[in-house]
Amino acid sequence: EDQVTQSPEALRLQEGESSSLNCSYTVSGLRGLFWYRQDPGKGPEFLFTLYSAGEEKEKERLKATLTKKESFLHITAPKPEDSATYLCAVRSGGSQGNLIFGKGTKLSVKP
Amino acid sequence: GAVVSQHPSRVICKSGTSVKIECRSLDFQATTMFWYRQFPKQSLMLMATSNEGSKATYEQGVEKDKFLINHASLTLSTLTVTSAHPEDSSFYICSAPTTTNYGYTFGSGTRLTVV
């Protein structure tokens, strides 16, 4: 069964304190691992898509990496505006095209 | 490009009534629409997949007679929650695959509260 597990469930950081979020997955034929940001009461906002182990992508203070079993979202010198829930999702070869989501990591960055 | 407009953003209804949620693709044709439900501190869970001009496919445990999905055109998919009960209170989100590098575009979500 395809599964996505994110840790930690919640993370509190001071402004400027770098850290990483983890996404572990088991999937039958990975066809993409997606990272989204979700603000309260809003739909997910696209951040990155990774397709193969070793791939890395960066955007401002965020960097996503992928291995055969997990992905990391590294946040460098976060700011309060980075506070949000970060969702990881996978598309498997066995799906009908839908994404399978983890529960998310709620990030709070204090000034 | 590839925008999905979802309405309403919030709705409060009385127990036993029905509520319709609309998702419109504004600048592309959405042949497929995924409908998700999200409970607090939980994942987005796929409820059903709708394809234009055909019957929706529901995930196990989702009542198709309660959650009516219509995808009659390439730009509009609707989810109707019939005879709503408090346990149906949740955040409903639609999503469509796109050819952009995003892969998928999401609606802004509908917060349904049944009282």
Image (cartoon, rainbow, N blue to C red):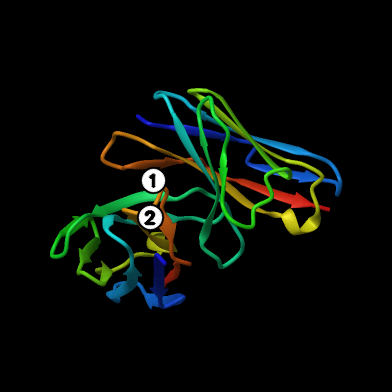
Disc 2 crowd, CA 10 A, few/some/many (<14, 14-19, 20+)? many
Disc 1 crowd, CA 10 A, few/some/many (<14, 14-19, 20+)? some
Q: Is residue B98 above or below residue A72?
A: above
For the residue labelled by badge 1, is the local secondary structure a helix, a strand or a loop? loop
Residue A76 percent location from the top left of the image:
24, 68
Q: Is residue A31 above or below residue A110?
A: above
- Residue at point 42%, 24% (across, down): B29
Q: As shown in the figure, which amino acid type bears the numbered disc 1?
A: Gly
Image side of residue B61 versus residue A54, left or right: right
For the residue labelled by badge 2, is the local secondary structure a helix, a strand or a loop? strand
Q: Would residue A52 be visible to someone looking at this image?
A: yes
- Residue at point 33%, 64% (across, down): A27
Which residue is at the front of the view, B78 or A43? B78
Q: Is residue A100 above or below residue B71?
A: below
Quadrant occupied by the C terminus of chain A: bottom left
Mark sitting earlier along the chain (2/1): 2
Residue B50 percent location from the top left of the image:
53, 36
Give the mark count: 2
Q: Which image quadrant is residue B78 in?
A: top right
Image side of residue B96 versus residue B93, left or right: left
Q: Which mark is residue A32?
A: none
Q: Can you identify the residue that label 1 sits on?
A: A97
Q: Nearer the viewer, mark 2 or mark 1?
A: 1
Q: As shown in the figure, which amino acid type bears the numbered disc 2?
A: Tyr
Q: Chain of mark 1?
A: A
Q: Which mark is residue A36?
A: 2
Residue A28 percent location from the top left of the image:
31, 62
Q: Chain of mark 2?
A: A
Residue A75 percent location from the top left of the image:
28, 68
Spatial separation of the CA atoms under disc 2 and disc 1: 17 Å
